[in-house]
Image (tube, helix red, strand yellow):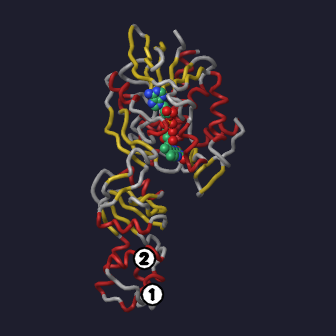
Amino acid sequence: MDHHIIIIGGGASALMLASLLPKNTATIIESNPKPGAKILVSGGGKCNITNSRMGTEYFLGDTNFVQEPLKKFNEKALLRWLERQNLNPVLRKETQYFCKDSAKELLDIFLKESKKQTLCTSEQVLEVTKRDEIFYVKTNKRTHTAKAVVVASGGLSYPKIGASSIGYKIAESFGHTVVKTAPALVGFTVQKEQFFFKELSGVSTDVKILVGDHVCEGALLFAHKGVSGPAVLDASLYWEKGKIEIDFLPHFSWKYVQGSKKQISSLLPMPKRVTKAFLLQFQLEDKPFHQCTKEEQETLQTLSHYSFAPAGTFGYAKAEVTKGGVETSEVDSSTMMSKKEEGLYFIGEVLDVTGRLGGYNFQWAFSSAYSCAKHLSRTFS
Ligand SMILES: Cc1cc2nc3c(=O)[nH]c(=O)nc-3n(C[C@H](O)[C@H](O)[C@H](O)COP(=O)(O)OP(=O)(O)OC[C@H]3O[C@@H](n4cnc5c(N)ncnc54)[C@H](O)[C@@H]3O)c2cc1C
């Protein structure tokens, strides 16, 4: 037997698990030439590690399942662990913790800590089978044997840095259900009625987006192909199809501007370019607000509840995460072990748990890895 534990994938959850396990107990198998590629590109290169506002309400999926790992290793525990490794993340945007200068600061810690395990890179896992209590992990290079296998292979987003569907395939081969996957934390493409957004490419404005019962606040960024930015990315978590409603004037009250002599483009608190683009669409000229007819005022007020159906999303190529994944009711939330196959574990994004924008996905990767590590350490010590 090579090692007791094989970890499939060398991303965030795998590296945390390898760091927490006793020395020489695990082998990480990563298809990329180097582990942790996604960490390096995350958070604009500074990795949004976690958030001071933590709770199950920031996650999509079964909140009962998320609760236990999050309780065992929450944002405070994570920050304490990082502090012990001499990493003190900095707070940005009030609640989000980032690496001070570069995501490499976090990756370096993981590379140092996980050195106590064996790391196989440029090796792609193809299949996992089990016979007589032994797992056989077939790769493009050889077949590893193990007593336990942890699937930490992530989701389908960002295929250019190694994402694959292997985790779902392994889950299904052991009788697990995989909840339909979709790109999430991703921009929306638009239909022809909104093609004029393209003219605003690069402009950002604060909005409130209503998707079903969910309200997502923050910046909206007009993009060449549609809309992006933090509020849109969060909204994509809850969108499947149909209309969304955008309030382009979230801190503005029409009540207090009645009779105003200001030009419309000076009155409305959004970038002038945006106001002018909408005026063009509404076939309204930019004039003093008090000169608008009742009907024209009503047209302008639709900016507070602008409703449209996105054509789709920018897809996995641009999505920060994959929603859906391994059905969590079939996994034990206190150990991350499959309820269908003893010794098979799932951690991180491969599970049907998706966090909102703001460091929640890394927190989930680390919290689920921690629960798994505690159990495996007891089992294999
Ligand atoms: C551009 C971008 C920015 C992001 N920014 C943030 C952020 O700031 N904060 C945040 O919380 N989240 C962020 N995320 C999301 C976060 O990176 C993921 O949720 C997190 O990395 C999931 O960890 P994981 O270990 O489950 O999977 P991953 O980190 O994706 O790791 C999975 C690993 O498995 C490997 N693998 C896949 N298939 C195979 C195979 N067949 N054989 C061997 N290895 C395989 C992959 O190469 C990969 O290294 C971002 C994501 C992207 C794409």
Residue at image x 41%, y 42%?
322
Which of the two discs, 2 and 1, labels the residue nearer the N terminus?
A: 1
Q: Which image quadrant is residue 80 in?
A: top right
Q: Which residue is mark 2?
A: 275
Q: Which residue is mark 1?
A: 263
Image coordinates of residue 297 in percent, x first then y, are 34, 83
Residue at image x 40%, y 65%?
198
Q: Can residue 152 be seen by looking at this rendering?
A: no
Q: SS class of the residue under badge 1?
A: loop
Label 1: few (<14), some or many (≥20) within 10 Å?
A: some
Q: Quadrant of the C terminus?
A: top right
Q: Can residue 194 be seen by looking at this rendering?
A: yes
In the image, residue 289 sits, relative to residue 82, either above or below, namely below
In the image, residue 273 sits, relative to residue 46, either above or below, namely below
Q: Which image quadrant is residue 244 in?
A: bottom left
Label 2 CB sits under 8 Å from any ligand 1 atom: no
Image coordinates of residue 86 in percent, x first then y, are 72, 39
Image coordinates of residue 296 in percent, x first then y, are 31, 84
Image coordinates of residue 184 in percent, x first then y, are 40, 47
Label 2: few (<14), some or many (≥20) within 10 Å?
A: many
Q: SS class of the residue under badge 2?
A: helix
Q: As rendered, which of 378 and 359 lies closer to the eye?
A: 359
Could you tell me the amino acid type at mark 2?
Answer: Thr
Report the side of 162 relative to 326 (left or right): right
Q: As rendered, which of 381 and 17 lies closer to the eye?
A: 17
Residue at image x 64%, y 41%?
104
Number of residue marks: 2
Q: Are marks 2 and 1 in contact (CB under 8 Å)?
A: no
Report the side of 221 relative to 291 (left or right): right
| Residue 91 - label | none
Could you tell me the amino acid type at mark 1?
Answer: Gln
Q: Residue furthest right?
A: 86
